[in-house]
Amino acid sequence: MLLRVDGFDYIPLASAQNALTASHLTGGGWRFQPGALQDYYRPAIIAGVFGWGHALFVDAVFGAGPTYTNPNMVLPLGVSATASGVVGARMFRGSGTIASPCLRLYDAVTNAPQLTVSLDAMGIIRLWRGDIGGTLLAASDAGAFDDDRWMTVELKATINTSTGEAEVRVNTGSVIHVVSTNTQATGVAGFDAVSVGCQIVGNAQAAFALDDLYVCDLTGSVNNDFLGAVQVRTQFMAGAGATTDFTPNGAGTNWQAASNFGLDDTTYVSDGVVGDLDTYTVQAVVNASIVHGVQVRGAMRQDDATQITARQVLKAGSTQVTGADHLTNESYQYYFDIWELDPDTGLGWTGTEVNAIQVGPKVEAIA
């Protein structure tokens, strides 16, 4: 089952190394290990893989400041710990980097990684139980990963103290595979988050980038294994949909008012009537014949103390569905819902079907 994707296209390209990038990341669910952002990481947004969309670039500087074992940017998945799953992403390791970029399956309850994949000098991939410097489970041959080049890194694992298994793939080719081993570093037999980051090496400076992130568990009939070199394509609003109940603020039309990258009140749509909803058409930018799933991302907040429950709407063909209940608060936050199958057909999505969807917000309840 597909748990989360992130292509970073929702963050403005102009937000290089400033607070706007950080606010978008935290609003999107990413959490920085205490102190890591101000002391180590300088996130920026750059052009994405193959010139499509945006990617996250991290310039990590290790020097003065509080000491953390290996700083993390953690993405909680909003699910209970799952014993088995896959995380994959396009990754870029800058040449001259001393502090190894990492991709981790993470236990957010104990704030510690279960397994870590590090991208080291000479193109060596290492798999660790726990963090870098923990227990080395395996290492690839040199040249498994190239510096200064986008490459797809995937980690599939079962977390267990004795029957654990883990496989690392680079550009869909297996470079590490361990079986019947201890893959559990914490007291929890599973992971409920993923993280990226670097190890600390003296006063070293590191540069790494991330794009097209996906996370799956191994349940269900689809998206239950390696997905390979996938691409996250973000479709922004393009026009009015079938229903327009909300009020536009700061722009002439609802879909334009809702098209705000800033996580602020420059433009927005608003409503306080239970059952009201807005729908918007989206850009037709998906050109794949097979689509693994559709994730709807919406930024919402409430402007008084009355609790509002919102849902996100997806209209596919003649079928309209809503996602989970989302309890809003006074600050903007992104909310996520995923549909792995087309609700109109009950089958896997095609690019044509995705290009024709409508999405938007709904006022579900007011306490």
Image: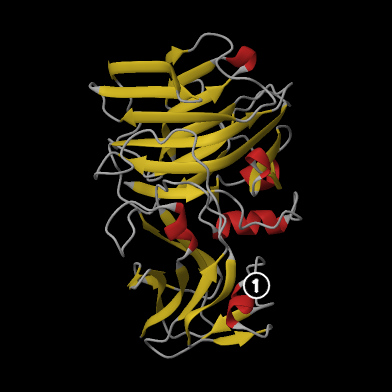
Residue 61 falls in image quadrant: top right
Of 177 and 316, nearer the camera is: 316
Q: Residue 207 location, x and y as percent?
A: 70, 32
Viewed as shown, does residue 270 lie left or right of 84? right
Q: Residue at x 50, y 44 (%)?
A: 74
Viewed as shown, does residue 125 lie left or right of 266? left
Residue 110 visible somewhere in the drawing: no
Q: Residues within 10 Å of mark 1 (few under 14, many from 20)?
A: few
Q: Residue at x 30, y 49 (%)?
A: 80
Which quadrant, please, contains the C terminus? bottom left
Q: Is residue 109 above or below residue 67?
A: below
Viewed as shown, does residue 234 lie left or right of 214? right
Q: Residue 199 location, x and y as percent?
A: 59, 27
Q: Is residue 246 above or below residue 62?
A: below
Q: Please, what is the three-letter code of the amino acid marked with disc 1?
A: Asp
Q: Residue at x 53, y 53 (%)?
A: 286
Q: Which residue is identified by label 1?
A: 264
Viewed as shown, does residue 2 lie left or right of 71? left
Q: Is residue 242 above or below residue 327?
A: below
Question: In this figure, what is the number of numbered marks?
Answer: 1
Q: Residue 153 location, x and y as percent?
A: 50, 29
Q: In the structure shown, which secondary structural element does the residue marked by tag 1 occupy?
A: loop
Of 50 and 77, nearer the camera is: 50
Residue 130 visible somewhere in the drawing: yes
In the image, farthest residue toward the top: 141
Of 193 and 268, nearer the camera is: 268
